[in-house]
Image: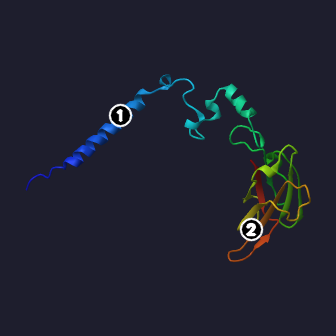
Amino acid sequence: MGIKLPSPAAIIAVAALVVATSGVSYAAGKIDTGDIANQAVTSKKVKDGTIKVKDMNSDAVTRLKGQTGPAGPAGPAGTARAYATVTTGAAYETARTKNFTTISRPATGIYCLNVIDSIDVTTTSVAVSPQWIGSTGDNLSAQWVENDFGCPAGTDVGVRTFTFAAGGNNTLSNNVSFSVVVP
């Protein structure tokens, strides 16, 4: 029985693969920062989230903090204009609250929150999440509500909190702590 030889097409394919991969590894090993012209890498060419504050000089960080957009001054990536953790007693946890001012609970499971005057919440989506520590019960939910639902006029952020049972209805509840963020 003879040895079966590969087809000419298979030999050409393997040779092409070897040539292609060796060129990439050669280029990767030979290009360094000295080979890149100043101003050659633009923001369009940089993958989002790859440059960190520690990678920037202080002038760049200062410029970033001073940038403005439709929602006002922008801070470094990962900051929020306002955030709060709200307890089941309708109070802010002081250490986990920034730029929220007043809070009330006019009815079961309905929270009415206000932020400092310089923040316009009508230009963003508010994020709300239940906090399991500090809450009681299972199957908890916290929702940002944009429309009138029982808060007085002038309320910036409305939140409703629920408990629910599988196959049952959601029930407004005062037993849900939550976090709220205004990006």
Compare residues 113 and 44 and report the one nearer the observer.
Answer: 44
Q: Nearer the viewer, residue 124 or 84?
A: 124
Relative vertical location of residue 120 with respect to residue 67 in this rendering, above or below: below
Amino acid type at mark 2 = Gly
Residue 41 as seen in the image, left or right of residue 60:
left
- The picture quadrant where one finds residue 60 is top right
Q: Amino acid at mark 1?
A: Gly
For the image shown, how many numbered marks are present on the structure? Answer: 2
Q: Position of residue 22 (x, y in %)?
A: 33, 35
Q: Which mark, residue 137? A: 2
Q: Residue at x 73, y 33 (%)?
A: 65
The disc at residue 134 is none
Asked which quadrant contains residue 155, the reply is bottom right
The CA span between labels 1 and 2 is 60 Å
Does residue 128 sit above or below 150 in this rendering? above
Colour convention = rainbow
Return the x and y of residue 30 as percentages of the image width and height.
Answer: 41, 27
Mark 1 secondary-structure assignment: helix
Q: Identify the secondary structure beneath mark 2.
A: loop
Q: Residue at 89% x, 58% y: name it.
A: 104
Q: Which residue is mark 1?
A: 23
